Amino acid sequence: MRVLSLSITLPFYTALACPVLMILFWDSFSFEVFAAFWLPALFSSLAVYLGSNNAVNGAAYPFILGSAASIAMLLSYNYSKSGGKYMQYTVLAVCLVLLAGFAVFRIMPVYRGDSLGKLNARINIGPAAGLYTTPQNQMLYSRIVEDLRADFTSRDSVAYIQCAPFAYMATDAHCASHTVWWIRLHSGRLLDYYRTNPAKKTEKIIIFNSYVGVHNDGDSEDALIMKFITDNYVIVGVREHYTFIIK
Amino acid sequence: MKSKRAVFLFAVIGIALLAAAAWRAFYGFDWSDESYYAALTSRIYAGDVPFVQVWDIHQTSALLLAPLYSLYRAVNEACGAILFFRFVFIAFQLFLAVFSFTVFRRKVNLTCALIISLVIFIFAPYALPTMSYNTMLVGFMAFCALCLYRVDDKAYRFPLTAAGAFYMLAVISYPVLIIALPGFVPVLILKARKHNLFA
């Protein structure tokens, strides 16, 4: 997680060098580079900060443009001045280390997953086919996709409760919810959606067990199922990793 | 550093990075965010009406990806769609890196242009190397900034128009980005003064 966090914030730290270089080398500083890359990066980062719930760290990535400005300033200054070979190679080495850092942070971290070395099971079906993951994830995912394919065809419309976007691509069934992200029943948005899109209303609901996907930190599957049962739904199938209910 | 040596060294680094990115594309399955990007595009492809039947806040980015996904579906099922988007991202980054190199090469020294383009190539927000509203935001903003940086006495109409088009694509990818517009005002003023544009 620490590596992933660093990979997100590295562009910001690199971009910070640019204003420092501006102060140090005011006379030879390229305001053109600063204005073309650093300022748009700053405003983009602000936009991401305002448009997401990932806080300041999560909004750091647009500063990759600012990082480009920092590198341009550093190397341009380095080659334009007679600082001597030693200085030139030192600065070049710093930039190469930076490039290596970006490469490591691209290759090594696995977003919400185990380390690369543990990803040795190949997925063969569904939208994730061709990817390697942990044997546990591979078994869980494959079983869910197989069960969903047995339960639904292209004539069906289905809503998946909990956060499991992959399921919408696992079969040819139509999406019958306002979002393919996390459906939280207490928000009432699903009901609002059916009111404004009656043609989308489905009687087929899948409630995944809480360990499927992420973000499922709200109601347990049992509590969710009870909510539907009190709304006249009945359970038509209890699969290994989800419950299929219908009205 | 001598030009030929620099080109050779960075060509080797570039090929190694490309190979590493392609190799890495096969590893890791994310249950949430990455699946969401693909599922959202799949939903638009399936015919759900944006803003009416689709209420996801990131749906505009999926509008840009839906034509590409349609091409994929013309010859495939949804099977392997996540891997497809990862390779589209690598191609997108490669194109951006080459464009970045050609622009910077005119303004700065060779080594500098090569390092910047490689950094731009290898970067992926959140270590999620796929087409998404995050990566398209960065990519299109980079294209936009590079076009503005490219403006000079001889070429300004096309780069300025292209910059506007790329900014539009960035805003479609991430609508809140509309507030970043003031960030481009200083470079436009600098360019207008330096190259006597709009006179």
Image (tube, coloured by chain):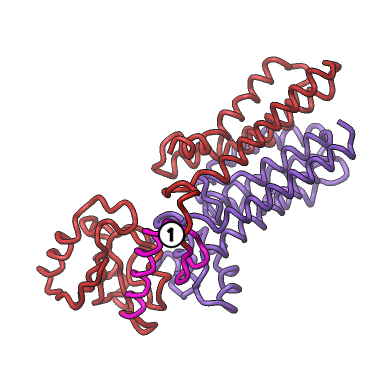
Whether residue B97 is visible to the viewer of this picture, yes or no, is: yes
Is residue B71 depicted above or below B92 in this figure?
Answer: below
- Quadrant containing the C terminus of chain B is top right
Farthest residue to the bottom: give it.
Answer: A155
Q: Nearer the viewer, residue B195 or A173?
A: A173
Nearer to us in this view, B101 or A27:
B101
Does residue B198 appear anywhere in the picture?
Answer: no
Amino acid under label 1?
A: Tyr
Q: What percent of the width, then of the height, locates residue A2?
A: 45, 35
- Seen at 28% across and 56% down, the residue is A211
- Apparent colour of chain B: purple
Q: From the viewer's perspective, is A26 left or right of B169?
A: right
| Residue A194 at x, y percent in the picture | 27, 70
Question: Residue A30, located in which quarter of the rendered image?
Answer: top right
Which quadrant of the structure image shows residue A65?
Answer: top right
| Residue at figure coordinates x 84%, y 37% from the top left | B6
- Point out residue A92 in the picture as x, y percentages from the top left corner: 75, 27
Q: In the image, which residues are magenta?
A: A122-150
Q: Going 75% across and 49% down the picture, which residue do you hit?
A: B99
Residue at the image position 72 percent from the left and 34 percent from the top: B189
Q: Is residue A199 left or right of residue B165?
A: left
> Color used for chain A?
red
B153 part of magenta stretch:
no
Q: Which residue is under mark 1?
A: B36
The verdict on residue A136 being magenta is yes
- The image quadrant that residue B29 belongs to is bottom left
Q: Is residue B122 above or below residue B28?
A: above
Quadrant of the rendering where the N terminus of chain B is positioned: top right
